[in-house]
Image (cartoon, rainbow, N blue to C red):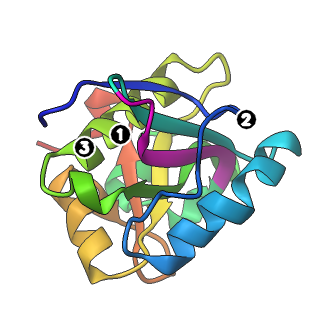
Amino acid sequence: MTAPFAIEALCPDHARTGFRSGVEALDRYFREQVTQDVRRRVTACYVAIEVDTGRVAGYYTLAAGSVLLAEMPEQIAKRLPRYPSVPVARLGRLAVDQVHRGRKLGAVLLWDAVMRALRSEVAVFSLMVDAKDDQAEAFYRHHGFAKFGSLSRQLLLPLTAHLIEP
């Protein structure tokens, strides 16, 4: 990365119209829907801002959720309490502006999401994501996420180190 970034909660001052990730669904969501979802408290959105220009370089969303214990991989489920569901932080969307592709900003945003989930005052066991395509799935798997559940491309990253198999 050449430009330093600050990661902060999305606010009305952040210009969203010029953001172009190359994935129209992610761009449209960021331009047209995210502020409504934040206002309704169904998601939180965090943006990477270029310190020098104030331009949005990337974003991700986080929301609380749960998954059925029965959907967890057996090696993880056997170490968890027998509650019907397990609390998770759901990474809803993650996108990087095309100008910043190849500079590891996506990994920085993912790390920030993991750290926010770990620091949350609301307990969550893992970070989960439904990868949108093969490229997104490969990105998340490269960063330690594993497949789980009955849906294709549903991935999980336990936030408790002793539950992650070596």
- The number of numbered discs placed on residues in the rendered structure image is 3
Q: Nearer the viewer, mark 1 or mark 2?
A: 2
Query: Mark 3 belongs to which amino acid?
Result: Leu
* Residue marked by disc 2: 12
Query: Mark 2 belongs to which amino acid?
Result: Pro
* Residue marked by disc 3: 105
Q: Are marks 2 and 3 in contact (CB under 8 Å)?
A: no
Say which of 42 and 21 sits in front: 21
Q: Is residue 67 above or below residue 56?
A: below
Q: Position of residue 20 (x, y in %)?
A: 42, 65
Question: Badge 2: how crowded within 10 Å, few (<14), some, or many (20+)?
Answer: few
For the point 42% across and 32% down, the residue is 49
Sooner in the amino-acid sequence: mark 1 or mark 2 = 2
User: Which element carries disc 1, helix, strand or loop?
Assistant: helix
Give the Cα distance between marks 1 and 2: 20 Å
Q: Is residue 61 above or below residue 125?
A: below
Q: Are marks 1 and 3 in contact (CB under 8 Å)?
A: yes
Give the Cα distance between marks 1 and 3: 6 Å
* Residue marked by disc 1: 109
